[in-house]
Amino acid sequence: MTKTLIVYHSRSGYTRRIAHELARRLDADLDEIRIVQPMKGVLGYALCAIEAIAGLAPALRPARKDPAAYDMVVVGTPVWFWSLASPVRSWLESHPLPGRRLAFFCTMGGSGAGRVFDAMRQISGCTPRVTLALTDDEIDRGRLEGLEVFLKRLQKPVTTRRRRSMRDARRLPASHQEAAA
């Protein structure tokens, strides 16, 4: 059985909801990415936007789980202003993941997933096995068909052919990577 860790950051709760659902369905451990100085209210919202757009990486509280102890790591992030959430950027920069099976998911108001997944790939230096992007509206309405597909693909054994296609997918633009994987 694959030992799985779900790592995520959530400001509004959408990413948290999906992380908890994934953990329940995969019998995985959870670790929330927590920043040292939480940003609340309107000012916090504005600071989050600035950090995300500028590609900044805020200080984080120590992780509760060591990703090196897991076979698979699933990293979840909200999309902030069409950019990777700064706490997830910090976490990826401080936790090398070579040799780990990796997957990414994001929640968003409407768009930006491709750009966020590209940033996550670049920072981690790894191509994820599968990605999932859900809008807040899909989550609110319980339209989680994408989650079902994500779970099925995540649980498929990796074959030599699949490894080769994942390697080849690194050369494709983000919009084509789902089809290649």
Image (tube, rainbow, N blue to C red):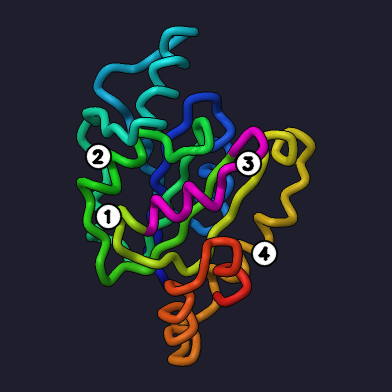
If you read the primary sequence from the N terminus, does the residue marked by circle 1 or circle 4 appear first?
A: 1
Which quarter of the rendering shows the C terminus?
bottom right
Q: CA distance from mark 1 to mark 3?
A: 28 Å
* Predominant SS along the magenta part: helix
Answer whether labels 1 and 2 touch (C-beta < 8 Å): yes
Q: Nearer the viewer, mark 4 or mark 3?
A: 3
Q: Amino acid at mark 3?
A: Ser
Instruction: Determine which of the numbered discs, if any, sits on residue 63 in the image.
Output: 2
Q: Nearer the viewer, residue 17 or 121?
A: 121
Q: Which residue is mark 1?
A: 67
Earlier sequence position, callout 4 versus callout 3: 3
Residue drawn at (68%, 60%) of the image: 148
Q: Disc 4 marks which residue?
A: 149
Q: Report helix, strand or loop for mark 1.
A: helix
Looking at the image, is 18 positioned above or below residue 35? below
Q: Find residue 125 and report its image quarter.
A: bottom left
Front tag of 1 and 3? 3
Circle 2 SS class: loop
Query: In whole angstroms, how far apart are the C-alphas of marks 2 and 3?
Result: 29 Å
Sooner in the amino-acid sequence: mark 2 or mark 4: 2
Along the line of sight, which residue is nearer the eye, 73 or 42? 42
Q: Is residue 174 left or right of residue 141?
A: left
Q: Are marks 2 and 3 in contact (CB under 8 Å)?
A: no
Kindly identify the amino acid type of the residue bearing the numbered disc 2. Answer: Ala
- Write down the residue under mark 3: 111
